[in-house]
Image (tube, rainbow, N blue to C red):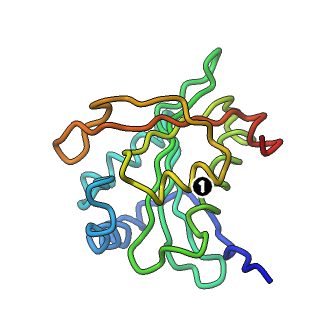
Amino acid sequence: MSRLPPRITLRAATDADGPALIAAHRASTGLHAPWVAPFTDMAGFRNWRAGHAAGIAAGFLAEDGDSGALVGVTNLSQIVMKAFCSAYMSYWGIAGVTGGGRMTEAVRLTLWRGFRVIGLHRIEANIQPGNAPSLALVRRLGFRHEGFSPRYLKIDGDWRDHERFAILAEEFETGK
């Protein structure tokens, strides 16, 4: 019998979540490096939330539906509507609660919100070539590989190469 992924809930962060999220990020630096460098102080938290308030980003806390434990963060950034209807996706797990399909489910729920609630047509994910877990995650969810982008994104002070993936609303809906 196959094991079903745990029930995950997504919710927008509130100001009250800052200290716990910062602590989780600090405890997860070994898991995150060198792939992502999430904020580790209140100024970074406030900056992250400012994009949400401006409507150019949507960030979510992924929590275990049974225990309420934080399992990760998902983001849709650079949200552009009108004729483009596109955004970039990023995500990261929290140390101690990785595996078991939690982040796959969190990303799936974020895609659903992006396509069904926000009204996006396309969501792009850019992943460093050596980040095997993230590459496997987007492939599991049906993202299409679109190319390689050298020195694409500056992370923790260094320009990093990325593989570019995307999924369209109709691909997500049909699983193709």
Describe residue 168's horizontal placement relative to residue 24 as left or right.
Answer: right
| 54 vs 140, nearest the viewer | 140
Q: Residue at x 18, y 41 (%)?
A: 158
Q: Position of residue 136 (x, y in %)?
A: 54, 55
Q: Is residue 112 left or right of residue 55?
A: right
In the displayed structure, does residue 67 sit left or right of residue 15?
Answer: right
- Check disc 1 and report its element: helix, strand or loop: helix
The image quarter in which residue 62 lies:
bottom right
- Crowd class of label 1 (few under 14; some 14 to 19; many from 20; radius 10 Å): many
Query: In this picture, is 140 found above or below 58?
Result: below
Image location of residue 24, percent across then percent down: 35, 72
Q: Nearer the viewer, residue 116 or 164?
A: 164
The one of 18 and 106 positioned closer to us in this rendering:
106
Residue at the spot 52% in from the left edge and 42% down from the top edge: 76
45 sits to left or right of 68: left
Residue visible at 33% across and 68% down in the picture: 31
Place of residue 36 in the rendered image (x, y in percent of width and height, measured from the top left): 32, 53
Q: Residue furthest left?
A: 157
Q: Quadrant of the N terminus?
A: bottom right
* Position of the C terminus by quadrant: top right
Residue tagged 1: 107
Q: Check disc 1 and give the amino acid type.
A: Val
